[in-house]
Amino acid sequence: MPSKTKTFDSNAKTTTLSQRAAVATIGGLLGVFLLIGVGFAGPDIIHNAAHDARHANVFPCH
C-alpha cells in the first residue's frame, strides 16, 4: 500500500490580517455602491435594475 504523505511548501505566500481587511473593505464598499448608489441613479433602466435586485435580496428601499 503506497504511503500518503503531506508536504508543505515553505515558499507559500501568506496574507496578513490587514491585507484581508483591505480586500473585505473594498468589496463591502463596492457592494454598498451597487445597492445604494446605483439605486438612486438617474436613468430609469439602471434604477429599476437596482430596485429589483434590492427587493430580490429583501433589502428595503422605500
Image (spheres, rainbow, N blue to C red):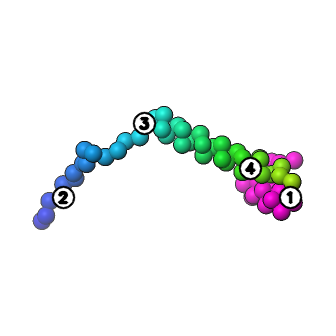
Find disc 4 in the rendering and name its residue.
35
Cα–Cα gap, marks 2 and 3: 31 Å
Crowding at dot 4, Cα within 10 Å, few <14 / some 14-19 / many 20+, comes out as: some
Between disc 2 and disc 3, whose residue precedes?
A: 2
Q: Which residues are magenta?
A: 44-62
- Which residue is at 53% across, 37% downward? 21
Tell me the tag on residue 43: 1
Q: Is residue 23 left or right of residue 34?
A: left
Q: What amino acid type is highlighted by mark number 3? A: Thr
Find disc 2 in the rendering and name its residue.
4
Crowding at dot 3, Cα within 10 Å, few <14 / some 14-19 / many 20+, comes out as: few
* Residue nearer the viewer, 46 or 5: 46
User: Are the residues at dot 2 and dot 1 in contact (C-beta closer than 8 Å)?
Assistant: no
In the rendered view, tell whether residue 44 sits above or below residue 11.
below
Cα–Cα gap, marks 1 and 3: 41 Å
Between disc 3 and disc 4, whose residue precedes?
A: 3
Q: What amino acid type is highlighted by mark number 4? A: Leu
Find disc 3 in the rendering and name its residue.
16
* Residue nearer the viewer, 34 or 59: 34
